[in-house]
Image (tube, rainbow, N blue to C red):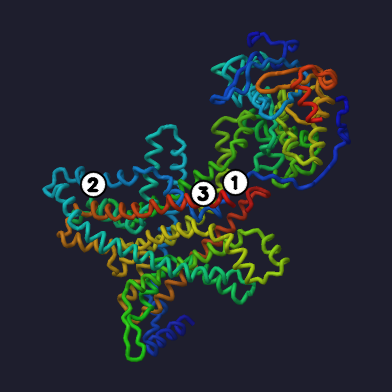
Amino acid sequence: MLEAFQDFFRELAQTNPKWNFIYLYDPVQTERVLTGLWTTIKLSVVCVVLSVLIGVIGAWLQGSPIKWLRMFVQGYIQFFRNTPPLVQLLFFYFALGQFTPTYSPDGWLEVPIISNVGWAILSLSFFAGAFNVEIFRAGIESVPDSTKEAADALGMNRFQIYRYVVLPLAFRVSLPSLNNNLVNLVKTTTQAIVIAVPELLYQLVSIYNDYSTAQNACMVLMFLVYIVLVGILVMGMNKWERNMRIPGYGQN
Amino acid sequence: MSETEWTPDQPIVSIKDVHKSFGDLEVLKGVSLDVMKGEVICIIGPSGSGKSTLIRCINALNDIQSGSIQVEGQEVNAPGLDKLELRKKVGMVFQQYNLFPHKTALENVMMAPLLVLKQPEDEVEKRARALVKKVRLEGKENNYPGELSGGQQQRVAIARSLAMNPDVMLFDEVTAALDPETVKEVLVTIKDLAAEGMTCILVTHEMGFAREIADHIYFTDRGVIVEHGPPKTFFESAKDPRTREFLSQIL
Amino acid sequence: MAMLKPIPGISSASATDMAVLKPVTVATPGSASDINFSRFVSDLPWWTLPALAAIFMMWPIAAYAQSTFTMADATSALIRWLPFLVFQGFVFNILISVTTMALGTIAGVVLGLMQVSPNRMIAQPAWLITQTFRNSPWLVLLFIVMLAFPFKIEIGSLTIQIPDWIKAVIGLSLPIMANISEVVRGAIASVPSGQWEAAESLAYSRQQTLWRIILPQCFKRMIPPWMNWYAILTMATPLVSLLGVEEIVTLSQQAMAAENSRPELLVPFYGFCLVIFFAYCYPIARWTIALERKYTVKL
């Protein structure tokens, strides 16, 4: 069954040299596509988790009474939100990468502590995290003072008000914007190609660089895979938003 | 009147010469009043006369510049005020209900006793159900505030306050945001409460209601108490021209 | 004076289930998210730019205090290349962004109007196209357009060479088109349905209603998100460097290569790229927010 399938595409490549779906019959190329896809997913998941953490911590620091701390967070957001992520990746990897210490695993080779994948994770997480700080802060600010006052009048302390009233409401308000940003983050992982992170786009581009007849086939896959990947993500997020919705609260 | 000496025959809430400003705007210019245990008093007056600010000062939601507010002998205007102690004694209901929208009606009522008083859950739930029943909302326990009408939400808010077993209840224009049809159901609830002997301080625009339930009426205008007295004398033979003008406009 | 209003039924609870829901007003993120980016940028203090510039200029001092290649060397290299980077590089980024925006807006408006068509045969494909290009990574679209488009077009004996940057413009136009399409659809949907009904009752045709009544109302509402997308697009233009188009990032890399690829140059050169984008987007964002405030007050 599988062989018939592979043979069909092998033959198609011979009769139509422009449509060489090499990744469907050559196990080596299939492997490349799959590792690329797996790298994209891992990169996305790690960056999503880190960026949400950065967002929560940043929003918390922005409420700090210490002025220089707030200015520091503001400066961080400024840097990452107002410059192209592609240039950020270049800047992090090439410009900052030269200052990171190296270590030698085998006594011969000097390897930097932070690899290109490491820099991609850092750069992309801080990029998306800068947006998340603002999103969470807007969510926290959207909780009306009167609701907090009611909790105060019931004798709750500051921590309890934050933990049981402000955060649950802020989270629900933030969720749509957060989801938009996370979807955008997954799309932005493609830009890690600029520092040769072997994610899906990188692998597909390498395949058609190696086999020029596979160009069209690679483009078709490129287009479809990302549409499906992002589509699944968007649908999942929408379902999550619906589940989190409180009856009668904040509907458009 | 020091903190240890309070006895039930003394005023449960005692306000003396309270001044309060927001920036340059002085909203309370020396207000004094006493409330005895079990008494129901209504504060009326034109908007911006400082009546809401006054009752918000009683449970320290607003601080005051000078003067003294004591609740059961506890000085509210003291530097090291134990807010938790104060708020166990004083319950408050707001104009905009301010329920927690992500909690059901029952959860709204249970939240503070569980978190603040750390009472056992089964006991709190039993009491919360009884309170929901008391405000005539059986069957709505599991509804979210967004699914309830304004009057129903306000009654949940009253139950939520009562769950803390307060000695004094403050009502800040609790019917002002409601539809005319639902005003009644909230007033009935308050009336029941007053009949049970709860000390109530109300800021209200419902003159008929004030006359019916209040033991004493205070009329405030521009930061001072202009006139006060029992409802009958107050409504039928007000002396001050400002009171007369206000009553003629509103009635 | 004695005639007090009675309160009928005060002693009997009246059970009304009239919905008088007054939900807490929350900033609905769906509508605002379109200009979140601009709002953020416009909130930055004015000294952000000089501070960023200073940081990038100071960096070599700290990093190369001991090196023979001093800060002065790195700075003078950057200053030597500055006119080249700005006038050959960044101006080209602007050219790409303006052309792309023009193309994307025209296509996006058409697509957006198709999305609100009552004819499902028109609306559904338009919706599908919008969602497809909105959800694809920009870089993927760029790769596909760069590779799928021919190098030249032959019309009879005439051969027209298509330069790479034109293909880049087309590639970037696709996501812009899709996002502008959503902006148009959202703006039209934000006009209360009563306006449509009122126009219908006055015997306006659907076309007349759309062009004479609905669009004039939502035109102003579309401007702030439109400008926000322009800023995002401008920040996406360095992507075309991956495809060999000679914009600022490509030229910076070439300039550094010409300066013997000294690693000391990386921070000032890439830093300069970051700063110049910021310098361009900041006033746009301020303006976007100013317009947004102005228009929302009037609504």
Nearer to us in this view, B168 or C21? C21
| Residue C57, label in figure | 2
Q: Are marks 2 and 1 in contact (CB under 8 Å)?
A: no
Q: Are marks 3 and 2 in contact (CB under 8 Å)?
A: no
Mark 1: few/some/many CA within 10 Å (<14, 14-19, 20+):
some
Q: Is residue A65 visible?
A: yes
Given the image, what chain letter belongs to the residue carrying mark 1?
A: C
Nearer to us in this view, C67 or A240? C67
Instruction: Name the residue that disc number 3 marks.
Output: C293
Which numbered disc, 3 or 1, marks the residue that appears first in the sequence? 1
Mark 2: few/some/many CA within 10 Å (<14, 14-19, 20+):
some
Q: Residue at x 75, y 10 (%)?
A: B9
What amino acid type should be assigned to the residue bearing mark 2? Answer: Met
Q: Do tags 3 and 2 sit on the same chain?
A: yes
- Residue A89 found in image quarter: bottom left
Quadrant the N terminus of chain B occupies = top right
Instruction: Name the residue that disc number 1 marks.
Output: C26
What amino acid type should be assigned to the residue bearing mark 1? Answer: Val
When the figure is inspected, residue B162 is found, relative to residue A132, above or below; the finding is above
Q: Residue at x 24, y 60 (%)?
A: C85
- Residue A163 found in image quarter: top right
Real-space Cα distance between discs 2 and 1?
43 Å
Q: Do tags 2 and 1 sit on the same chain?
A: yes
Real-space Cα distance between discs 3 and 1?
18 Å
Real-space Cα distance between discs 3 and 2?
36 Å
